[in-house]
Image (cartoon, rainbow, N blue to C red):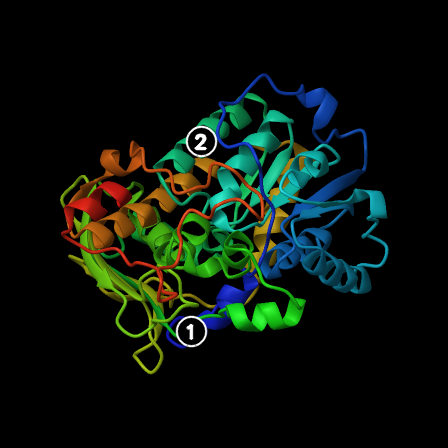
Amino acid sequence: MNEPNKPNPKSEVTRRNFLKTTSTVMGGTLMGGLSIERSAFAAGDDTVKIVLVGCGGRGSGAADQALSTKGSVKLVAVADIHKDNMDEKLRLLGQKHKDRVEVADDRKFIGFEAYKEAIGLADVVILATPPGFRPIHFEEAVRQGKHVFMEKPVGVDGPGIRKVLAAAQEAKKKNLKVGVGLQRHHQLGYIETMKRLHDGAIGDIVSMRCYWNGSTPWVKKRKELEAKYGRPLSEMEYQLRNWYYFVWLCGDHICEQHIHNLDVMNWVKNGYPVRANGIGGCEVRKGEDYGEIFDHHAVEFEYADGSRLSSQCRHINGCWSNVSEHAVGTKGACDISGHIIRGQNAWRFRSEGARDPYQQEHDDFFDAVRNDKPYNEAENGAKSSLTAVLGRMATYSGRVIEWDQALNSQVDHMPKIFAFDAPAPVQPGPNGLYALPIPGNSDWYKKIV
């Protein structure tokens, strides 16, 4: 992870880079499903078969970490909607893990339905597509009785989050292990800091704040993409290639990045906010390749006990950059990301023995799979994702939004049909620009809340 006060948000984003996997059929409730004995990893077989759905930067990173765990593991299939992504990432993984990558040509699945066939070959499925697809893919993996590691966020709107929560309950019934890429929960410095906060090291917590302020991450410009591929791109393909800038795919950067900090603050509280209000907009990151998302958000979240969290996330070059979390209590203060407590119970974490949290989360997950340990991070992943969605709804609308209002929202940002020639959920105007939310506007309110 980035150094707490010297972040490199661009590198963090590229870790969770490109994907492209999908589904033609939206929705549907969890149906029947295969038996655990038939489909999930069994202790009698020493090799855990891994399938990667989404061959972007974060997908290949997660696959690398999964293949670096102890014991016999094999990457046996991949799925994506872009062949160039798949070929390049498989080449790199094969170079590093020569004996652990065995993906025959007939196990390279391309297309919007590809994930279904790939999942059927797995003991463990890695879901690393753009976040909008996560609920569909997670639901299918659970239906087929597979253990799942999925990247965060796990949804971008209320309907998607509800789907994940329902699948999480089914996963528990089937004794499936589910990991979510909120790696701070596996980072020793955070774990030790949280123990002390929960034991009262700074007394009653009276205020909290967190930040993900940094520079603009990658952008895939339409003209450059079309020059690369030698043809015009449909609007759907363009948005899939440049997914970071569209709500239906990314959820806005408050969801895609700032979720890490919001998740930490929920961990501090051992709970989730009840409402939020905020301000935001697009001040400088404008142009036909920057889609429909804001470049800054400032949100106040309120928890059930009346305590409040002030959060900021910003993508504006040349401004103050900071990625961190903090709490102030009646007996002291804590730099949570720096793992430092000041006050009556002063303490500082010493990093001896601490491991890379990205690798540690996979080590913990695969240990649970192999040894049948309780392991299901899906519910927290869904609720921390909803925390970010709640914040976005507050900034886009300019109103106070309640937790239940966000969870039960019927605004579904996903397309009804998935195909390169199908209509994309949003379209550029005559000037090539995408419309931005207008806080306080009643017509926009209906579109986003």
- Residue 182 in view in this figure: yes
From this view, report whether residue 17 is shown above or below residue 146. below
The amino acid beneath tag 1 is Pro
Please name whichever residue, 131 or 273, is drawn nearer the observer in this view of the structure.
131
- Residue 72 in view in this figure: no
Q: Residue at x 45, y 74 (%)?
A: 8
Question: Looking at the rendering, in which quadrant would you find the C terminus?
Answer: top left
Please name whichever residue, 144 or 369, is drawn nearer the observer in this view of the structure.
144
Which of the 4 quarters of the picture holds residue 278? bottom left
Q: Residue at x 75, y 64 (%)?
A: 92
Q: Is residue 202 left or right of residue 63?
A: left
Q: Secondary structure at mark 2?
A: helix
- Which residue extends farthest top? 32
The x, y position of residue 93, in whole percent, is: 75, 60
- Which residue extends farthest bottom? 318
Q: Secondary structure at mark 1?
A: loop
Disc 1 or 2, which lies upstream in sequence?
1
Which of the 4 quarters of the picture holds residue 232? bottom right
Q: Residue at x 65, y 43 (%)?
A: 366
Mark 1 Cα within 10 Å, few/some/many (few <14, many 20+)? some
Mark 2 Cα within 10 Å, few/some/many (few <14, many 20+)? many
* Callout 1–callout 2 Cβ contact below 8 Å: no
Disc 2 target residue: 163
Residue 375's label in the rendered image is: none
| CA distance separating discs 1 and 2 | 33 Å
Disc 1 target residue: 7
Q: Is residue 145 left or right of residue 247?
A: right
The x, y position of residue 177, in whole percent, is: 59, 34
The amino acid beneath tag 2 is Lys
Q: Residue at x 49, y 69 (%)?
A: 219
Which is closer to the viewer, label 1 or label 2? 2
Q: Is residue 305 left or right of residue 263?
A: left
